Amino acid sequence: ASGASTVLVPIYLGEMAPPNLRGVIGTMTQFACVVGILFADIVGFVLANETSWRWMFSLTTGFGICQLALTPFLLESPRWLLGRNPSSSKARFIIKKLRGFRYDEEVETEVEHYLGAAKTQSLNDDSDGGQDKDKKSVMAEMLADEKVRLLVVSTLVLQVANQFSGINAVFYYSGLFFDGVIDNPLVGTTLMGAINVVATYVALLLMDRCGRRTLIMWSSAGMFASCVVIVLSLLGYFSKMVALGAVATYVSFFEIGLGPIPWLIVAEMFGGKYVTVAMSMSCQLNWICNFFIGLFFPAMNEALGAYSFGPFAVVLLLVFLYALIWLPETAGTTPAELQAQLVEKNAGVTYHNMDIEGMAAHAPPSKSEWEQALAELAADEEKNDKDYGQFDSMRSG
């Protein structure tokens, strides 16, 4: 159930959110996770003992029942409804309710944005021999298609970085850092959980003001610097309090970039054909990396000693370079709008399984284009009325 939620919730939120709020709403998944971790830490003060620890598992059942009770209030994804039936009145009702539209014209403009992207992708799939591709698995097709490969690689790189940055080494073995500074390890773990929540709230404020690529670079650079300070502190160049502050900084920088972005960016990169497979593949890779970190970090810490965070620093440096050179920016766009923005930069090539030059012909009109067209129509009607009035006066004269 947890694995299914990890896959489905970011996709669902990405399809429901408008482009200008997709970062904030997508980050809510991570925010809910860190609040849950902090809640578990706090509950641990009461129930983490030899006689009461079993009661902690009953809380999961309670939350599960609440979630089932609230499920009927969830709205269906309009993108999914329109993909099955472009004339869906239910999809239009949901769009009107979600966006707060007052007029049907606004709803139809939004519908055209959904349908335009799906139509463009469908046309491109047909031109590429879609019937032959149906015989292949979607995953193999994504990896083999040069037009989608960069997006797939970017998704996988971010998922690996999410874990191999070493964040869960800090949370799983946080007692190693608090030894000699905080007597009760649970207090230190709860302190890190509180910092996690505050940092994720800051990420909510930044997510749609800064680009995804920019935040990934800030995050990886800040974590890299924190790793260097942690290693120097463990070598004895700084005090344990400085090491603890570096760990707090490390966690904070993780939450503004490498924490939430690898999950929300999948729905921004891929259309309906690929998004579920891409998210499933990302989730599997993330949990595999998580397993390796939890399993091998104690041995790595014993072997490397004070340099145990050195490998994480190398990973973070490589992530920064990848984001600087190759990672595409997805903030504030739908997949179709992303193609339109890339027309000048990538004229003559295809991207995201769509013909960029053809995008201009197939893309639905934006709101500003609608307003301009209506203004021109009104001006033409006014001119025609004047011409007709002059013609009528000449006849009567």
Image (cartoon, grey):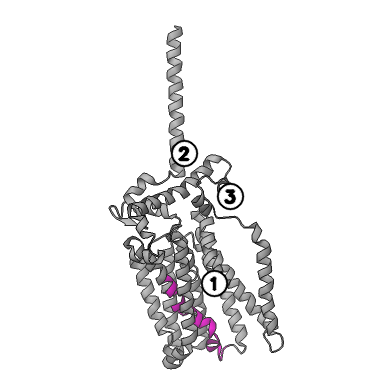
Q: Which residues are magenta?
A: 158-181
The circle drawn on residue 371 is 2
Q: Amino acid at mark 2?
A: Glu
The circle drawn on residue 94 is 3
Q: Is residue 229 visible?
A: yes
* Residue in view at x 35 percent, y 65 percent: 149
Check if residue 176 falls in the magenta segment: yes
Q: Amino acid at mark 1?
A: Gly
* Residue in view at x 43 percent, y 36 percent: 373
Q: Amino acid at mark 3?
A: Ile
Q: Is residue 197 visible?
A: no
The circle drawn on residue 3 is 1
How many C-alpha atoms fall within 10 Å of the one at disc 1: few (<14), some, or many (≥20)?
A: few
* Foreground: disc 2 or disc 3: 3
As rendered, which of 230 and 360 lies closer to the eye? 360
Q: Secondary structure at mark 3?
A: helix
Alpha carbon of mark 1 to alpha carbon of mark 2: how far?
44 Å
* Residue in view at x 53 percent, y 89 percent: 176
The quarter holding residue 201 reads bottom right
* Foreground: disc 1 or disc 3: 1
User: Are discs 2 and 3 less than 8 Å apart at CB?
Assistant: no
- Residue 197 horizontal/vertical position (percent): 57, 71
Check if residue 126 falls in the magenta segment: no
Alpha carbon of mark 2 to alpha carbon of mark 3: how far?
23 Å
